[in-house]
Image (tube, rainbow, N blue to C red):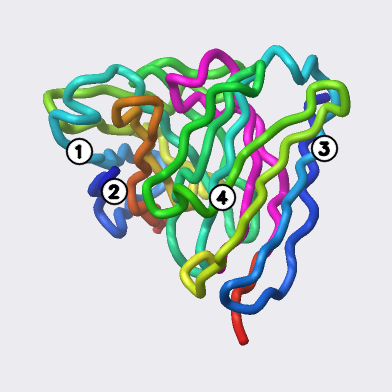
Amino acid sequence: EVKLVESGGGLVQPGGSLRLSCAASGFTFSFYPMTWVRQAPGKGLEWVATVKQEGSERYYVESVKGRFTISRDNARDSLYLQMSSLRAEDTAVYYCARAFRSAYSPDFDSWGQGTLVTVSS
Amino acid sequence: QSALTQPRSVSGSPGQSVTISCTGTSSDVGTYDYVSWFQQLPGKAPKFMIYDVNKRPSGVPDRFSGSKSGNTASLTISGLQAEDEAVYYCCSHAGSYTFAFGGGTQLTVL
């Protein structure tokens, strides 16, 4: 069974940093592109970042470029999102998701339960 | 990476069909046949329902179907059931390995 478990969320002050993790199991993690999607309270889904299988190619939504870094450790079956210079508008539930074919298509077939990040003073 | 446009809400009675539209531009939906749909129940993670405009992952009932015309993709749910009540999101490739989601449509089964 494919399982994705996010952790690392919490309350952080504006301008602060946080690192999210996503532990994967039940599949060969290194075979799949991985993605972070967020959802602000009461709002819709927003794609945040995607990393290809080998980890060297990464893509971001414009609003987080230069502030967030997506990475992965295939030896540990783990995905990460390093977030810095956090703003109130980054407050959201952050989901990690697997893309079952390529980094080019939004075929996010498995999702974690999400971790809440709250940016507030 | 502008958001795709979906109606805020649609509704239908059990057994009826409903269609949810997802309007983008020539930079996303109009150019790429990489449109997916997701179903989200309250307090839950999204569920993968349709990919490549009209393909269903295994386990998704054939009551769910997708299509596209020009800059607009659509999700049709036939034979509505109470359990279909949820928020539905479309998502499209938007160039250069980026993605755009729609704002979400609340489906109410009357």
Q: Is residue B24 left or right of residue A118?
A: left
**Residue A121 against residue A82 in the figure, above or below:** below
Q: Residue B3 has which mark?
A: 2
Q: Residue furthest bottom?
A: A121
SS at badge 3: strand
Residue type highlighted by circle 1: Gly
Q: From the top left corner, tell me how far across and down residue A93 is, in percent.
A: 61, 59
Q: CA distance from mark 1 to mark 2?
A: 8 Å
- Check disc 1 and report the residue beneath it: B24
Q: Nearer the viewer, mark 4 or mark 2?
A: 4
Q: Earlier in the sequence, mark 1 or mark 2?
A: 2
- Residue at the location (37% across, 43% down)? B101
Say which amino acid is labelled 2.
Ala
Marks 2/3: CA distance? Answer: 29 Å
- Residue B49, placed above or below residue B59: below
- Helix, strand or loop status at disc 4: strand
Q: Which residue is mark 4?
A: A68
Q: Residues within 10 Å of mark 1 (few under 14, many from 20)?
A: many
Q: Are marks 3 and 1 in contact (CB under 8 Å)?
A: no
Residue pointed to by mark 3: A23
Percent x, y of residue B8 = 29, 59
Q: Distance of mark 1 from mark 4, alpha carbons? A: 26 Å
Tell me the residue at 34%/28% (across/down): B93
Horizontal arrangement in the rendering, residue A24 relative to residue A43 (left or right): right
Q: Earlier in the sequence, mark 4 or mark 3?
A: 3
Name above or below for residue B63 compared with residue B104. above
Residues at discs 1 and 2 in contact (Cβ within 8 Å): no
Tell me the chain of label 2: B
Spot occupied by residue A25 in the image (x, y as percentages of width and height) = 85, 27
Highlighted magenta segment, given as a residue range: A91-116
The amino acid pointed to by label 4 is Phe
